[in-house]
Image (cartoon, helix red, strand yellow):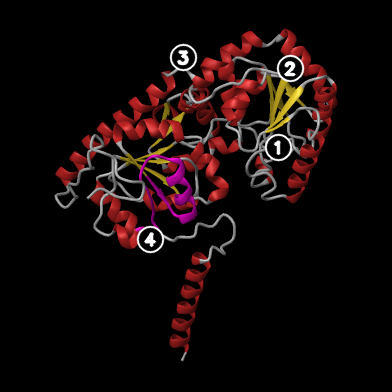
Amino acid sequence: MQPRENTLNRRLRSVGGRLLRRYRLLPGGMPDGLGDDEDLQDQALYGDVIVYFADTMESMYQMRGWYGPLKALHAELGVTVVCMDSRVAEVLRDEMDMPVVTVALDATLDGLITRSGTKLILYVNYNPLNTAPLRSRSVIHVSLLHGDSDKGVSVSNQVKAYDYSFVAGQAAIDRYARYTSLFDAASRCLPVGRPALDTDLEQVTLPERQDERPTVLYAPTWEGGQAAVAYSSLRTHAEALLRSVQDAGARIIYRPHPLTGVRVPEFGAADRAVRELLAEGGHTLSDDRPLSLDVAEADLLICDVSAVANDWLATGKPLLITTPAEGTAQEAGTRMLDVLPRLTVQEAPLAGQLVLEAISHDPGREERLQLREYYLGDTTPGASLARFLTTCSELAIQRDAQWARIAQLSPSAPHSRSPSPSSPAPSSRATTP
């Protein structure tokens, strides 16, 4: 009876799993796996590029940071977004003008890649579920990530799973070379700047300034997945530093991280306390505003060790970076953390004085401008986007040359080609006929 019982148990688990997915009762962070698999049999994806995103809605900010560059890439090479979560796919179809499909089964994904002749697969994070497309040897796999920073996760050993890593500038290459063993950063890291800074700024219309007070953007990171990446100042610095900045007569833009309080409830409580503190006084809560608008309005940034600090360098404006109060956080420090002013928890009550001094006199401006090129490369408007598009095109050519050599050595290798991106793009759910 035991084999029959095992079979029955498996069937019950399978039915239960389908019901949980269908009625969207899965735990947060788990993709629902409600794929378009049946409709994708014998189909091919549009374009030369796949963006693979296996996450759920909690991590949508990682994709949104690449919308502008991906739209430009879609116009040149053709892009299809492949998800594992139908809820994410539904939102992406509304927000991105390009094909989006949901794939639940590895076999479906393997067949799509083979039939489509996909040349590049791009990844915006290190999700363990990325292993599904990473099995494919007929494409070039590129890690984009969703920001460049001196966090320890920026030099994760997981980078070795990808053929190349697109990085912002020389600082990131040096960071990998210093902190990631047995990894050839010089050849595997390709500097493209931060192309989203080009595309996002084009969409900002800055309203006429009505408030003459200096404006400070406070953008803390989230609590992190473990103690080694606990960089957030929200629970330790925020109340004292914001009271000090408020008392100094500055306007505050508070931009909480989308994942704040997801892992540690106390950070959710700290977020609510900051909202209450800033409820009056003409301050701004930035929940749904684009980051580019916050950056354009602010005269100074206070943030933690995070990608926000690196991107801010493009503005040339002053910033303060907090020092984690907990001694467990592991930084992958580069020149920025040695040069820029840091704000410890003990100094948080002095933040207002430091802010006014930095905005009025900006003693560190020259050093910051030198850092800008080191971290971001050429920040001339449009230069980074051009590097991103050119590098993707060059990798597509490299893939074709390599796959042709493989095909000569292995006659059984499939000789498929991608649908021409110059033809009209299909609807967001469709594949190429």
Q: Which stretch appears magenta?
A: 81-106
- Element under label 4? loop
Q: Which residue appears at 42% of the width and 46% of the height?
A: 93
Q: Does residue 47 appear left or right of residue 332 in this picture? A: left
Q: Earlier in the sequence, mark 3 or mark 2?
A: 2
Can you give x and y, in whole percent of width and height, for residue 11 in the image?
45, 78
Q: Earlier in the sequence, mark 4 or mark 3?
A: 4
The correct choice, above or below, for 336 with respect to 23 in the image is above
The residue where tag 3 is placed is 380
Q: Separation of disc 4 and disc 1 at Cα? A: 37 Å
Q: Nearer the viewer, residue 148 or 22?
A: 22
The residue where tag 1 is placed is 232
Instruction: Kindly identify the amino acid type of the residue bearing the numbered disc 3.
Output: Thr
Q: Earlier in the sequence, mark 1 or mark 2?
A: 2
Q: Which residue appears at 34% of the width and 31% of the height?
A: 392
Q: Separation of disc 4 and disc 3 at Cα? A: 43 Å
Find residue 41 and report its image quarter: bottom left
Q: Does residue 152 appear left or right of residue 251 in this picture? A: left
Residue neighbourhood size for the residue with mark 4, other residues' Cα within 10 Å, grouped as few (<14), some (14–19), many (≥20): some
Whether residue 119 can be seen here: no
Q: Earlier in the sequence, mark 4 or mark 2?
A: 4
Can you give x and y, in whole percent of width and height, for residue 279 in the image?
79, 35
Instruction: Kindly identify the amino acid type of the residue bearing the numbered disc 2.
Output: Pro
Tell which tag, 1 or 2, sits nearer the viewer.
Answer: 2
Instruction: Kindly identify the amino acid type of the residue bearing the numbered disc 4.
Output: Leu
The correct choice, above or below, for 247 with respect to 90 in the image is above
Q: Separation of disc 4 and disc 2 at Cα? A: 53 Å
What label does residue 105 carry, if any? Answer: 4
Query: Is residue 216 in the magenta section?
Result: no
The residue where tag 2 is placed is 214
Can you give x and y, in whole percent of width and height, for residue 373 in the image?
52, 15
Q: Given contact means CB atoms under 8 Å apart, are the residues at marks 4 and 3 in contact?
A: no
